[in-house]
Amino acid sequence: LILAGFSFGAVIQSKVCEIAQPKQLLLISPAVNLFEMGPASPNTAVIHGENDELVPLDQVRTWSTQQGIPMSVVGGADHFFNKKIPALKQQILELCQC
């Protein structure tokens, strides 16, 4: 089982992870500044846009560091990865253990 979520969906998946115990948790643009995240398991990875206008990169970087989980940044990407979907896809393929 691999869980993945985007923005608020990342928050929800972080909470589902507490119960489901997936092989991997992939959080894309997690809304760490808007909602309380569940604890990150060791098999968690984060992908975030460099220019995210809704969830500041610094806050996600701080949260990821505090959780001890890897974080990948998509250069020039906004919250919705407009015109950066190929770069997001590449990051997902590199991080996903599927």
Image (cartoon, grey):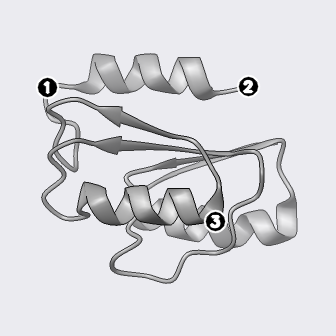
Disc 1 versus disc 2: distance between alpha carbons? 25 Å
What kind of element bears circle 1? loop
> Residue 93: in sight, yes or no?
yes
Give the camera-side residue of 61 and 89. Answer: 61
Residue name at image x 18 percent, y 36 percent: 77
- On screen, 37 above or below 60? below
Instruction: List x then y, in percent, for residue 90.
Output: 43, 16
Q: Quadrant of the N terminus?
A: top right
Left or right for 21, reference 9: right
Q: Quadrant of residue 75?
A: top left
Mark 1 neighbour density, 10 Å: few (under 14) some (14–19) many (20 or more)? few
Q: Which mark is residue 14?
A: 3
Q: Quadrant of the C terminus?
A: top right
Instruction: Look at mark 2 in the image and give the residue it sits on.
Output: 97
Instruction: List x then y, in percent, for residue 86.
Output: 30, 16
- On screen, 86 above or below 32? above
Q: How many marks?
A: 3
What kind of element bears circle 2? loop
The amino acid marked with disc number 2 is: Gln
Residue name at image x 33 percent, y 66 percent: 59
Q: Which mark is residue 30?
A: none
Instruction: List x then y, in percent, for residue 46.
Output: 51, 45
What kind of element bears circle 3? helix
Mark 2 neighbour density, 10 Å: few (under 14) some (14–19) many (20 or more)? few
Left or right for 44, reference 49: right
Instruction: Look at mark 1 in the image and give the residue it sits on.
Output: 83
- On screen, 35 above or below 67? below
Lower position in the chain sequence, tag 2 or tag 3: 3
Disc 3 versus disc 1: distance between alpha carbons? 27 Å
Instruction: List x then y, in percent, for residue 56.
Output: 23, 62
